[in-house]
Image (cartoon, rainbow, N blue to C red):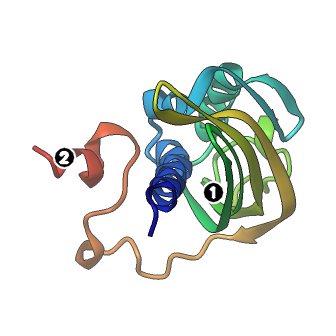
Amino acid sequence: MSHADINAIADRLEITDLLHTYCRALDRYDRELLQSVFHPDSTHVMGGFEGSSVDFCELAMDALDQYQHTQHLLGNIQVLLDADKACAESYFHAYHRVAADTPAAGFITDHTAGLDEDLILAGRYVDRLQQRQGVWKISHRIGILDWCRWEPASDRGFFSAAMKPYGSRGRTDSLYTIWD
């Protein structure tokens, strides 16, 4: 295997980690981590939003306020490399728990008030990435929604004492406390 092949594998791994970090940041409600995956001048097109990724991160954090829990999963990640530039397409499934007492407004106008619901979205992130000073980050993202579905929530015994610990948002999640 050539040195160039090894570098390409390392670049693909770094980019894949970066894409997964985006999902972790959303699900752990970590604003600083979310902002860290984008170059400062990065731009964003997603869900009717078009502008800077800095502004999109603020919008995303506001949207996350409306959900009890989220889980963003990536699959089918394809990375095309060209020196210090890359393009990536990654499929996503995003699960959002909406509590019964959450008003049907803003990002969740289709929510049925009085009912715990799950909003499931599927689509693709299409990214342009750049390696600057040896670090890969997203310079432009297009979020493409392929489908969505609302379902009544059903946890059937999940929140029993035997199933702890539960995932949580922010620095109280086991992800952050495992290193202590």
- Residue 130: horizontal and vertical position, in percent? 63, 34
Which residue is painted at 36% across and 58% down in the image?
A: 167
Label 1 sits on what residue type? His
- Residue 121: horizontal and vertical position, in percent? 75, 61
Which residue is painted at 69% across and 20% down in the image?
A: 55
Residue 150 appears in the picture as rendered? yes
Which residue is painted at 47% across and 57% down in the image?
A: 13
- The residue carrying mark 2 is 177
Label 2 sits on what residue type? Thr
Farthest residue, direction left:
180
Residue 104 appears in the picture as rendered? no
- The residue carrying mark 1 is 96
- Residue 84: horizontal and vertical position, in percent? 61, 37
In the image, residue 11 above or below residue 84: below
- The C terminus lies in quadrant: top left
Q: Nearer the viewer, residue 52 or 113?
A: 52
Q: Which mark is in front, 1 or 2? A: 2
Q: Nearer the viewer, residue 147 or 151?
A: 147
Farthest residue, direction front:
2
Q: How many marks?
A: 2
Which residue is painted at 54% across and 49% down in the image?
A: 15
In the figure, residue 157 lies in which quadrant? bottom left
Q: Nearer the viewer, residue 173 or 4?
A: 4
